[in-house]
Amino acid sequence: MPQIDGGMDDKLEPFFQLSAPEPADDVREIRLSGDVMVIGRSPKGDVVLDLDGVSRRHAEVSRDDEGWWVKDLGSVNGTRVNGELLTDRHLLRIGDRIEIEGFGLLYRC
């Protein structure tokens, strides 16, 4: 499971700033770790978004030599990046916002 904390270290490791739909001030940081992380409603996932409109295995972020990528895993309600519905995998850039059923995951370092 990824670490969830409020601190940063000097290594500039990538993380998501997760904002939940309710309460509006619920913001957490989720460090990206390993090579693949699954985002979804399942408690077995790496990033759990507990809302009915979120599929059990909704999206995936993965790392390669170019950086971190996000792709939708065939979810019913889709995954958006910066307001655009994903149809293929997307290479994340600092400031990109992944949107899943009211949740926002801002990609940061």
Image (cartoon, rainbow, N blue to C red):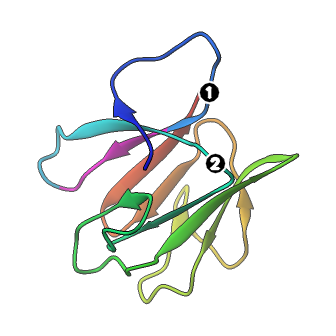
- Asked if residue 17 is among those painted magenta in the image, a careful observer would answer yes
Q: Magenta part of the protein: which range?
A: 16-21
For this orientation, the residue located farthest to the left is: 23
Of 13 and 90, the residue lying toward us = 13
In the image, what residue occupies the spot 33% across and 58% down? Answer: 103
How far from the left and from the top, in percent, is residue 39?
Answer: 46, 64
How far from the left and from the top, in percent, is residue 88?
Answer: 73, 75
Does the CB distance between marks 2 and 1 fall below 8 Å?
no
Residue 85 to residue 75: above or below: above
Specify few, some or many for label 1: CA neighbours under 10 Å numbering under 14, 14-19, or 20 or more. Answer: few
Of 16 and 88, the residue lying toward us = 16
**Residue tagged 2:** 34
**Residue tagged 1:** 13
In the image, what residue occupies the spot 62% across and 27% down? Answer: 13
Residue 60 to residue 94: above or below: below
**SS for tag 2?**
loop
Of 52 and 84, the residue lying toward us = 52
Cα distance between the residues tagged 2 and 1: 12 Å
Asked which quadrant contains residue 87, the reply is bottom right
